[in-house]
Amino acid sequence: MEPLIKVRDLYKIFNIGSNKVYALNGVSFDIYKGEFIAIVGTSGSGKSTCLNMLAGLEAPSKGVIQIANKRIDRMNEAQLVRFRRQNVGFIFQSYNLIPSMNAIENVAMPLMFRGVGHEERMKAAKHYMELIGIGDQSMHMPNQMSGGQQQRVGIARALVIDPQIIFADEPTGNLDSHTTADVLDLMKRIVSEEQRTMVMVTHDPHIASWADRQLKVVDGHIVETVINESSPIEIKIKEENGEPPFCEVTGS
């Protein structure tokens, strides 16, 4: 299997006075289509920096980021904007819904930037709201919805552009434990049934345990990889070549 995302010797270095701070220190890993990956670490570990660089929101200091056979580390800002618009959906911790828009308008909004007409936007938004179980809340405003409902709107908004990859930044950080389990179960089902690739950042090992594979980050190094043996991607890779997904442990 060819990886969808290939990262090699990735660095992010900040100059603070006369000191160099390594937010990421030479990490390398592969992510496959249809995989649910958790990048796990405490605050300041480098996990969010890693996510931002995979999403093309931050430029690496050096290293390779290849997504769908395209070197995004070599793209300029205009190219990155087009790449994200065509390939990437985002799920945020704080939902980032527009308060003056109702739920279905929030879901449909990313399609505006693609020049999709109103009727087609609404049809696509309705489809994904029904897919994740909130089709009856289309006309609700964000302040009329619970945190879990707002996050489901956020998930539908990420899906509406039909992305190859969904990046999720602490997607359950503002939810209670019961709602967290519901949202994680939904995300896992979407990856499986819709054949999306999900890359989630979290500080919580329990949240990370829902993923097919965990990349544990400490001080800019990947120190451990934990693989869920029931992962369909893991099983397929072993059937094809008997090797686990690539991830180079870069620190201890």
Image (cartoon, grey):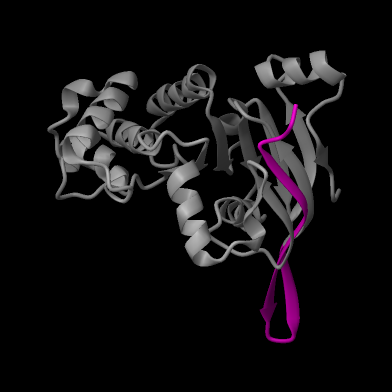
Q: Position of residue 2 (x, y in %)?
A: 74, 32
Near-viewer residue (110 or 143): 110
The image quarter in which residue 231 lies: top right
Q: Is residue 201 left or right of residue 123?
A: right
Q: Is residue 204 left or right of residue 131?
A: right
- The residue furthest bottom is 18
Q: Position of residue 180 (x, y in %)?
A: 43, 29
Q: Is residue 148 left or right of residue 16?
A: left
Q: Is residue 192 magenta?
A: no
| Looking at the image, residue 155 lies above or below residue 110 | above
Q: Is residue 143 left or right of residue 185?
A: left
Magenta stretch, overall SS: strand
Q: Is residue 3 magenta?
A: yes
- Residue 132 visible in image: yes
Q: Residue at x 74, y 15 (%)?
A: 235
| Looking at the image, residue 213 lies above or below residue 215 | above
| Looking at the image, residue 48 lies above or below residue 124 | below
The image quarter in which residue 122 lies: top left
Q: Residue at x 45, y 23 (%)?
A: 181
Please give the count of numbered marks on the rendered protein: 0
In the image, the segment drawn in magenta is 1-23
Q: Residue at x 75, y 80 (%)?
A: 19
- Residue 170 visible in image: no
Q: Position of residue 226 (x, y in %)?
A: 75, 30
Q: Residue at x 72, y 71 (%)?
A: 21
Near-viewer residue (46 or 29): 29
Quadrant that contains the N terminus: top right
The image quarter in which residue 244 lies: top right
Q: Position of residue 252 (x, y in %)?
A: 86, 48
